[in-house]
Amino acid sequence: MSAATRPSSARRDWLLGASALCASACFGCQRRGGERPLRVWAHQGQEGENRALRRIAAKFASEQLQGRSALELTFFPDHHYTERLSIAAAADDMPDVFELDGPLVARFADARQLAPLSELFTAAELADFLPTIREQGTVSGQLYTLGAYDSAAVLYFDRPLLDSVGASYTHGGPGFAWAELLDTCERLVARGIVPLSLHTAGAADEWFTYAFSPLLWSGGGQLIDARPGGGVRGVLASPANIATCRAWQSLFARSFALPDAVDPDPFGNGTVAMDWSGHWMARSHLKNKGPALGVMGLPRYGPRPVAACGSFCWAISSKTEQSERAARWLRWVTDARHGVAPLVEANGAVPARFSAFAAFPEYQSLPYSLFRRQLETFARPRPHTPFYATLTQKLAAALRDISHGADVAARLRRAEDEVQGFIERWRGTLQVRN
């Protein structure tokens, strides 16, 4: 992109800064000449994670740029971040390299905003990344993103409580079959114990898709036909999804889980026996429960287990004029020692590279070893589709209503109609433009 076509700095400030708070830091700016710094954008996560990324950037500027150029690192709050990227793309003013939420890779790839990454890494280096990280970043056979960490969802449980009601389980094993989950819940309720926390009260849209898509997949369903020309008609409201969602709804109908529970950590606080949650609660649950903490895979409605995965990943703009430095940053921030280890230490996520696990001995034991095993074997990214943002919004709205007793088939068909309508309008607009 030439200077003549780049928006003025005043317009860029209005587009990117006026409606959302952001925090920027420039590394190496004191020593650089007139060369534009490498622009790096990231989501504003936990403060410890933000500090770690700033330290990674400072070390990169010192060791890789060595005063010849600078790096400008800008954080945006989570709830504004994708909007900021979309505005930047519309203004033809994308940063050189940026974080991207994993389910949105296909959207930005479809808009031709991402540069391919395969040639930046050897085959051996790519094989060092978890298969879920590679799959998350691959669209139509082309690798566009790589991440420093991944995520995992599991069912935590209080072992003494489940023992006290005679429940059968395998600590560290596959999740309950649906009949086993219901039997355990019935036993707990009979003893006056609230069985399960699903964190549906006040949860963001993405929680519903992330946490409960594995259940739909295990029941033989899909969220969308992501092939070219595909959609959700006959898919989102399929008989398999209707059956699975009716089973999920029964957890609330039978008071095995509460749709409006306000306690953000009822399991840690000792008011429920099981917690449908993820890796981010491992440190807290271990502290609160100690050896009483149990963990297994998520419950399944069909014969095969499926696990959730996915997180923020790194991409290079297809429009960058600094592709060499952008590539060096991406390699640095996903390097096992320079990027993965400090970020995982800060945020507690799962290392994205096999070579990084040596720095985290806790992955030799539960619950951490289960996180890794799931990601290596049966975890599945959310669908690769440019319509994902609409899909997750409408599915989440449907699941909220279903948890409160809505007719399952009718509510899924409504969500299906809404998503398919959006897809058809988008395709119609694209045809007019072409």
Image (cartoon, rainbow, N blue to C red):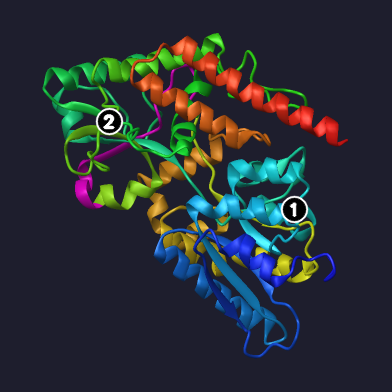
The N terminus is located in which quarter?
A: bottom right
Q: Residue at x 35, y 37 (%)?
A: 202
279 sits left or right of 214 in the view: left
Q: Give the percent coordinates (x, y) of residue 64.
A: 67, 79
Residue named by callout 2: 260
Q: Is residue 262 visible?
A: yes
Q: Give the percent coordinates (x, y) of residue 14.
A: 62, 64
Q: Earlier in the sequence, mark 2 or mark 1?
A: 1
In the rendered structure, which amino acid carries the disc numbered 1?
Ala
Q: Is residue 351 visible?
A: no
Q: Residue at x 15, y 23 (%)?
A: 165
Mark 2 neighbour class, 10 Å CA radius: few under 14, some 14 to 19, many 20 or more: some
Query: In the image, is residue 219 above or below residue 91?
Result: above
Of the pair 21 and 167, the residue shown nearer to us: 21
Q: Residue at x 36, y 38 (%)?
A: 277
User: Residues in magenta?
Assistant: 287-305
249 sits left or right of 231 in the view: left
Q: Give the percent coordinates (x, y) of residue 370.
A: 42, 41
Q: Residue at x 53, y 48 (%)?
A: 311
In the rendered structure, which amino acid carries the disc numbered 2?
Asp
Of the pair 10 and 251, the residue shown nearer to us: 10
Of the pair 73 and 278, the residue shown nearer to us: 73
Q: Secondary structure at mark 2?
A: loop
Residue named by callout 1: 123
Which residue in the rendered view is the most extreme toward the right?
434
What count of labels does the image hold?
2
Mark 1 neighbour class, 10 Å CA radius: few under 14, some 14 to 19, many 20 or more: few
Q: Secondary structure at mark 1?
A: helix
Q: Which mark is residue 370?
A: none
The C terminus is located in which quarter?
A: top right
Query: Magenta includes 136?
Result: no
260 sits left or right of 335 in the view: left
